Structure formats: C-alpha cells, structure tokens
Image (cartoon, helix red, strand yellow):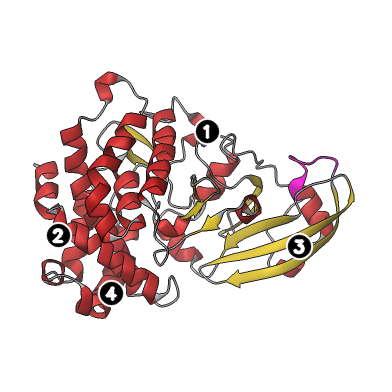
Amino acid sequence: MATGEANTTTEPAPLRVPADWADVTPQWMTAALADHHPDAEVRDATLVTRDDGTNRRARFELTYAAGSGPARVFLKAEGIHREVHARNGNLFNESELYASREPLPLDHPLCYRAVIDRPGLDYVLVMEDVTDRGGDPRDSTRPLTVDQVANGLRGLARLHSRYWEFTAATRPKLAWVQTWAPTEGFQIGLRRFTPRGLERGAHSLPAEVTKYDGDGIVDLWASYVATLDRGPLTLLHADAHIGNTYVLPGDDVGFLDWQVVRRGAWPQDVAYFLVGALTVEDRRRAERDLLGEYLAALDVPARTRPSADDAWLHYRACAAYGLAIWLSTLGTDGYQSQEISLLLAERYAAAFVDLETEPALARLQA
C-alpha cells in the first residue's frame, strides 16, 4: 500500500508540464519514473483515457525497452479553473505536498513525480493508478458502509496523530501549508453559486435550510471555518468527501486529491468525510460510535486529547461546512454532476437539522 513516503522530486530538469497529453513521450515518461525505477526505459506511452475538465486527467499504458515499472500510470494537471484555484489558495497544494516527501500514513496514490510550473499556473503529477491495486473510486451515488467509514476514520486519525500540533518550525517542509481561514478568495465562488444551488435543491431540502439565502449559508460556512484555527492543529486533507475516496479489497479506504490540504482542527476532516460518505440512515445510526472509533485511534498527548463531549460539539457544527460547499457545487455546471451534488447537499442538510448545527456553532463561537 502507498501509505509511506510521498516520494517525488521537485528537480525540474528535464521535465516540463506537458501542454497537451500528446507531448508525453516515452523519454518524458522515462524521466518521470526515474526516481522510483532508475533502470526503466519506456518504449511506448499510450494514452488510453483522458478527461480535460476541472483538472486535466489521463491514463497511459506503458511498455518498456529496458528495466521495469508500472504497466499503467495516472496523470493529473491543472485545467480550466487555474485562476480560481490560485485565488482560493489551492493551486499547488497537492503537488507541493507530494514534492515535500513527508509521509502520509494512510492509503493514498503513490506519486512518481511532481512537476510545478509556477509562472504558467500549472503542474503535473505522475501517479500510480490505484485501480491496479483493486481500488474502487466512490462518489455519493455509491455510499460507503459503516465499517468502511470506520477504516477511513482510522486512517485520518493516523494522519492527524503524526502531524498533531505541527508548525513551520517543527515541519519545515510543510511551512507552505496554509492555516484554515474563511478567505475572501474562497468565499467569492461560494457566494456566487450557492443561491443557484438553493434554487436547484429547494424541492428536496428541509425548510430549516431553505429559510436561508445564499449569503446566509456562506456566512455559516465562514463562521465555522473561522473556528478551525484553534488548537490543537494538524495536517488536514481538508477535502475528504466521498468523491475523493476509493475502497480497496478488504475494505480499507484511501484518499485522493489533496489539492485543498490545510493546517487546522481535526473535526473538519472527520465530520466532512463521515456525513457525506454514508446514507442519512446509516449516519444517524452509527455517527456516535464512528466518532468514538476515530478518537480511540488518535494517538496524541493526553493534555491535547479531545474529550468525547467536546468532540461531539465540534462534530455537530461541521455540517455548516459541507452544506455550503455542496450547495455551491450544485449551483455550478461542470464541476460535478447535479445528481452527485444534490445527494451530498441533502446529506449535509439532513445533518444540519439533526445535529442542530446552528446552535452548536454558536456555542463554539461564544
């Protein structure tokens, strides 16, 4: 499993970010794999799938003139929203994380090479194709089981434990990681698209949610995010919704797409993942036990360990985060399908009501 070092290099020569997938030659791919497979010489790099949307993604099948390496690789580069990602502080996060070589102690794709083009607002990641290990990527139309979510939470607990209370001084390779804040750059898109998401979802959202206008929903999001800079802080995936997960044989859960990675309080990862990954019924039945599974797996100093009551309060407040994100996404065209976005908006809306998120958030702010 790719649960150890995120081994890549930031040395650019001789690689450049390909302007088009046709620019990925056997020589380019040989250089991309050299850190992990120094004896490999790629004979052919054949493009088998591509998706040029929010990000540019492609799969290549490889054959070798010498040595050996993966039979297939997955490439990810920036797409049509580079200015948006630069504005909200997410553009280079994933490539910086993989290039740092800092270990990520949960399942994630192995990255062979990260190439960053800062002036061009672009990057490319050359990664393993997790489907070769039996990885089954999920989305909201295929929710996880309670046991699978428990496994995912244990992985997040390992990640959070390793970087518990980290700072730029203690982890200089992660000095670039931003601490969560409700920045204006992040809010611009939310305030633009959430009103349309509310209109599109009005027929299936509870009155406790539709009583708000778009700005009201985003204000709740901002109020919640403003609580995430209170210690103890750790390294967060920060976008751990079900669409960024895959299930492995044996029901372990891995996490894709680290583009939003942040420094912040642990509940954002835990609640955002748990609420969105389960059906509403399964979440209602199992959420307290699942939160207990996470806390039991958290290996941190006793003086900083969250109490069960404090953890429950923070968990309740987090529905404000997912609700705004997925109502905003529902209001866009092209980021996610409306079916996927609506299902997630419904799950976070149900949690918003069930967990009395607004009064829980008020208590956190007091």
Query: Of callouts 4 and 1, which one flags the residue occurring earlier in the amino acid sequence?
Result: 1
Q: Kindly report the secondary structure that dominates the magenta region of the rendered protein.
A: loop
State the residue position of label 2.
Answer: 353
State the residue position of label 1.
Answer: 173
| Spatial separation of the CA atoms under disc 1 and disc 3 | 29 Å
Instruction: Identify which amino acid the numbered label 2 is placed on.
Output: Val
Instruction: Identify which amino acid the numbered label 4 is placed on.
Output: Gly
Query: Which secondary structure, mark 1?
Result: helix
Query: Comparing marks 3 and 4, which lies closer to the viewer?
Result: 4
Judge the density around disc 3: few (<14), some (14-19), many (≥20) Cα neighbours within 10 Å. Answer: some
Instruction: Identify which amino acid the numbered label 1 is placed on.
Output: Lys
Query: Of callouts 2 and 1, which one flags the residue occurring earlier in the amino acid sequence?
Result: 1
Instruction: Identify which amino acid the numbered label 3 is placed on.
Output: Val
Query: Of callouts 4 and 2, which one flags the residue occurring earlier in the amino acid sequence?
Result: 4
Which quadrant of the figure has residue 202? bottom left
Judge the density around disc 4: few (<14), some (14-19), many (≥20) Cα neighbours within 10 Å. Answer: many
Query: Which secondary structure, mark 3?
Result: loop
Location of residue 26 in the rendering, given as x and y in whole percent from the top left corner: 83, 58
| Spatial separation of the CA atoms under disc 4 and disc 1 | 38 Å
Query: Of callouts 3 and 4, which one flags the residue occurring earlier in the amino acid sequence?
Result: 3
Q: Nearer the viewer, residue 136 or 166?
A: 136
Query: Comparing marks 3 and 2, which lies closer to the viewer?
Result: 2
Query: Comparing marks 4 and 2, which lies closer to the viewer?
Result: 2
For this orientation, the residue located farthest to the right is 65
State the residue position of label 3.
Answer: 24
- On screen, residue 4 versus residue 31, left or right, reads left
State the residue position of label 4.
Answer: 197
Query: Comparing marks 2 and 1, which lies closer to the viewer?
Result: 2
What is the span of residues highlighted in magenta in the rendered image?
32-39
Q: Are marks 3 and 4 in contact (CB under 8 Å)?
A: no
Query: Which secondary structure, mark 2?
Result: helix
Q: Nearer the viewer, residue 301 or 289?
A: 289
